[in-house]
Image: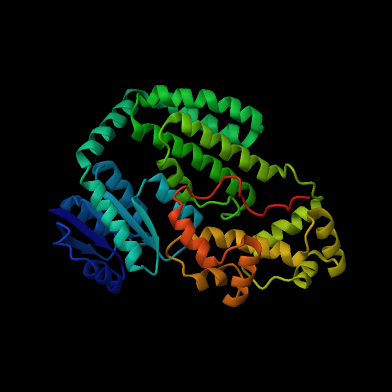
Amino acid sequence: MKKVVVIDDKSVVRNMIIRTFDWENLNCKVVGEATDGAQGQRMISNMQPDLLITDIRLAGRDGFALAEWMRTHLPCAKTILTTDYRNFDYARQAIRLKVHAYIIKPLQQAELSNAVQTALDELDQCPAAAHAAKQANGNETRGSGPIMSELEQFNIMIERASTGQMIDYLEGFIMRVKQYSCGSEIVWRGLISKAAMSIAEHYFKVTRDEYGMGLSLYQLLDDIDRLRSLEEAYAYLSSLITAIKQKLSGEGKHYTPLVKQIIDYINSQYSRNINLASVADHFGLSQSYVSRILRADTGVHFTDLVSRTRIEVAKQLLQNAKYKLNEVGDLVGFKNYAYFYHVFKRIEGVSPKEFKNSSHLNSAGTSLTNLGWKEQDQ
């Protein structure tokens, strides 16, 4: 029987998690619950759970420290992190620690149930996973220095190199990953994931826009999980690098510095009650002048530019089952669902519901070419 530990400082949350499932029917037993990180650390050390469900913000030790301990001492075990905060750094840390799931509160039963069930399914494959982890740890022990240096070089290159230089470098990088992994899929996927995260972190560092990439961190990692070979990994990273470099450099677009600043401002304020008057006031310009230069550079009117920005973000949120249709509209700045429906269908050709349903059927995820707002064909 698999052992489960639940840690959260709120009793109502712990009770909800513990009572949601028929643990016995799942061949599991909740062997302990804790209210803070220090108590939780002692509990997981003593109980050695197969599954840990913990909040991130805890007194004593936070959820990340507990996840790190689980990863180091119980490599086959699974950790599900929960949090009240939507935070890019939290998501990045969760991915670095390879937690099984990262769930934003309030907890939805369907999302939590799916996370628990998939964790238990993977635990059933534990012998194979343990063997692969042991092999990976053996590789690191025999000499992880070169590959760690390679990843550091990748970070430097993604910041400084041109697209062409980066693609040339990528071929050698993939070859060295292949040599280091010795055929272990768990190893090469981990290294490719680190490279992809470096690309995402570079984009975020430059733009501070966690939605502008066109796909979330978890979509990024999900794409990598679907790669079947290092050859596919090379093609995927090449596309990602090209798309991000173009996005950051503005290739194919001929915006003046002022128009770029206005677009960046719109990208950061789309969820608020933004309008032409507020943007003009922010830049100390007249409304007619802002409207004219945006139209001249982008080919669309101000309202269309804002609408397209909102719809691009809405498309990403609609791919997440936790968001309801009316919630998505509100999150991206549409306070009236009927208007959100109208604008979405005008731009995308389908309703938000139709898009949401089709995105669930299409497991391929978001195309790398659809990054952020796109200029209309001239």
Could you say which quadrant of the image residue 289 lies in?
A: bottom right
Q: How many marks?
A: 0
Query: Vertically, is 343 above or below 89?
Result: below
Q: Is residue 313 left or right of residue 186?
A: right
Task: Out of 232 and 64, give the one closest to the viewer.
Answer: 232
Query: Vertically, is 173 above or below 222?
Result: above
Q: Position of residue 341 (x, y in %)?
A: 59, 71
Q: Is residue 73 left or right of residue 346?
A: left
Residue at image position (76%, 46%) is 253
Q: Position of residue 327 (x, y in %)?
A: 51, 71
Q: Position of residue 131 (x, y in %)?
A: 23, 33
Residue at image position (54%, 66%) is 352
Task: Out of 335 and 34, give the one closest to the viewer.
Answer: 335
Asked whether residue 241 is in view, the answer is: yes
Residue at image position (75%, 59%) is 262
Protein image colouring: rainbow
Task: Out of 173 and 55, give the one closest to the viewer.
Answer: 173
Asked whether residue 161 is in view, the answer is: no
Q: Position of residue 342 (x, y in %)?
A: 63, 71
Residue at image position (82%, 59%) is 295
Q: Is residue 116 left or right of residue 215?
A: left
Could you say which quadrant of the image residue 22 lies in?
A: bottom left
Could you say which quadrant of the image residue 274 lies in?
A: bottom right
